[in-house]
Image (cartoon, rainbow, N blue to C red):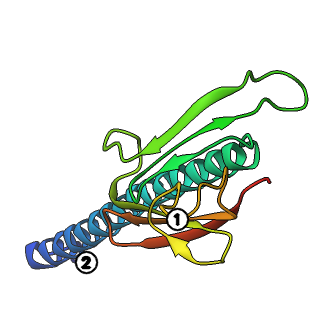
Amino acid sequence: MKARGFTLIELMCALLILALLAVLSFRGLAAVLDSRDQVRQETQKWRNVASFFARFQRDVQLSAPSPLRGTATSLEFTRLSTGEGIDAPRQVAYRVDQNNGLALAKFELQYLDGALAWVDAWPHAERDAPLPQALRVRVVLASGEELVRVFALKQ
């Protein structure tokens, strides 16, 4: 009776197949990890955007009925305190800051006057109204996404 075993060619074929499976598995795992990192970055970006708009909306809703100064790229106004009295009235300013957590390419503001026309600066040259009817914020992220939100001001 002859002893049966694997030949060298059979062992080499088996090792080759295992090596190919290992390489394919490694590439698949690397792709999954890269995708996870991209999803994490996108999630953080959109969290920052949502946080910015929530903070902006809160400040605008608590705006004081006093004069507001604004251009197409900046906004300054007085914000009242909350009903609980936790926040004190304070001056609020919004303008482009490249170190704000949002990778912004553009930040633009427009103001809705009493005649329901959008203007680029406030107070409008023809009218000295204390507050515009609404604010339109246009944000273009560095990645190219454009977001436009309209916020009504408390009269």
Quadrant assignment for the N terminus: bottom left
Q: Residue furthest front?
A: 126
Residue at the spot 37% in from the left edge and 63% down from the top edge: 141
Q: Which mark is residue 116?
A: none
Per the image, the residue denoted by label 2 is: 1
Per the image, the residue denoted by label 1 is: 126
Q: Is residue 153 left or right of residue 121?
A: right
Residue at the spot 48% in from the left edge and 44% down from the top edge: 94
Rendered position, 38 above or below 96: below
Q: Is residue 75 left or right of residue 133?
A: left
Quadrant assignment for the C terminus: bottom right
- Residue 85 image point, x, y percent: 86, 22
Q: Amino acid at mark 2?
A: Met
- Residue 101 image point, x, y percent: 41, 43
Gap between marks 2 and 1 measured at Cα: 110 Å
Residue at the spot 78% in from the left edge and 29% down from the top edge: 81
Rendered position, 62 above or below 39: above
Please report whichever mark, 2 or 1, sits nearer to the chain's N-terminal start: 2
Q: Amino acid at mark 1?
A: Glu
Secondary element at image label 1 = loop
Residue at the spot 60% in from the left edge and 48% down from the top edge: 51
- Quadrant hosting residue 14: bottom left
- Quadrant hosting residue 41: bottom left
Secondary element at image label 2 = loop
